[in-house]
Image (cartoon, rainbow, N blue to C red):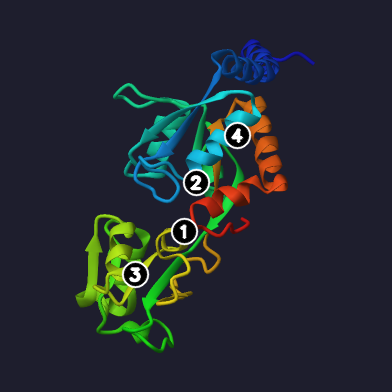
């Protein structure tokens, strides 16, 4: 049976592309090795994971680079309007302002829907499960029987955050008059410790890193209909064709977990590791 000329040409092109894919992935890994450095993109101002002072993602990135026999080259970047923008700018294309892409991007949600939408990005190696929690002052709110216990009390949230959206919209806005907006969750948590707030709604990692084991405060799980009760996993991302690099990083991350180094990195920053 003979294929029409167009179909035959298409078949040959597909076969050639398929044969080329492993070579491209291997070439990418060889290029990283040759450079001597692993370029890792981390978010700016995402304490305790990444900031000017370092963080969990920075330490994990350094440990991964060490496992590959490479130096770490950090590429901090500001969050875009959408995650797709960040993946485009930092993983597979580069920013129009001239920076990026990196070899690896940290702190990417490991979500099936997101992964299905990304044909140029490989998302893998989840290393933490994040959740939203409420931390309250026991003095300001001695008894907690659910979020309504906070009615009439000042609650801090970070601007343009999941916590802010959830709290401002909860119960048709019944908490709105007492929601206090802060530049960062860390700022809100510091005011909580100073007695200026009754509570803060934020990521669990943010709360643990600032409040720690301070007996004056209590960490509460609160239910929001629009938020998964189990939170969301975060992992890493590389270009889709960088298979060898992804496999090497996956192996390195597994070794960090098995050796206890991953847990020690979280503990260093006051955060309890939560398996994805």
Q: Locate residue 251: give its quadrant.
A: top right
Above or below residue 251? Residue 36 is above
- Image coordinates of residue 200 in percent, x first then y, are 34, 69
- Image coordinates of residue 86 in percent, x first then y, are 40, 37
- Image coordinates of residue 80 in percent, x first then y, are 33, 41
Q: With 134 as the anchor, is 267 left or right in this view? A: right
Which labelled disc corresponds to residue 200? 3
Which labelled disc corresponds to residue 205? 1
- Image coordinates of residue 239 in percent, x first then y, are 54, 29
Tag 4 residue:
64
Q: With 185 as the anchor, is 74 left or right in this view? A: right
Q: Residues within 10 Å of mark 1 (few under 14, many from 20)?
A: many
Q: With 111 as the anchor, is 180 left or right in this view? A: left
The residue closer to the viewer here, 252 or 265, is 265
Q: Element type at marker 4?
A: helix
Cα gap from disc 1 to disc 3, whole angstroms? 13 Å
Cα gap from disc 1 to disc 2, whole angstroms? 10 Å
């Amino acid at each position: 049976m003979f294929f029409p000329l167009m179909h035959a040409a298409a078949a040959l092109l597909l076969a050639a592309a398929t044969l080329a894919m492993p070579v491209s992935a291997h070439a990418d890994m060889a290029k990283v090795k040759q450079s001597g450095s692993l370029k890792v993109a981390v978010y700016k101002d995402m304490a305790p994971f990444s900031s000017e002072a370092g963080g969990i993602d920075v330490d994990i990135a350094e440990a991964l680079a060490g496992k590959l026999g490479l130096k770490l080259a950090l590429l901090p970047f500001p969050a875009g309007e959408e995650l797709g923008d960040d993946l485009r700018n930092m993983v597979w294309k580069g920013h129009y302002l001239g920076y990026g892409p990196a070899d690896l991007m940290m702190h990417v949600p490991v979500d099936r829907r997101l992964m299905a939408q990304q044909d140029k990005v490989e998302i893998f190696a989840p290393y933490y499960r994040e959740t939203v929690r409420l931390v309250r002052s026991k003095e300001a709110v001695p008894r907690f029987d659910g979020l309504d216990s906070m009615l009439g009390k000042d609650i801090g949230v970070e601007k343009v955050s999941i916590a802010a959206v959830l709290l401002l919209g909860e119960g048709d806005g019944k908490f709105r008059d007492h929601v206090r907006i802060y530049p960062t969750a860390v700022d809100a948590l510091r005011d909580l410790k100073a007695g200026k707030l009754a509570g803060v709604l934020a990521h669990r990692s943010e709360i643990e890193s600032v409040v720690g084991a301070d007996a004056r405060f209590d960490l509460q799980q609160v239910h929001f209909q629009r938020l998964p009760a189990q939170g969301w996993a975060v992992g890493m991302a590389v270009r889709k064709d960088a298979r060898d690099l992804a496999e090497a990083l996956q192996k390195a991350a597994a070794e960090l977990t098995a050796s206890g180094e991953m847990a020690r990195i979280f503990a260093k920053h006051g955060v309890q590791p939560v398996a994805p």
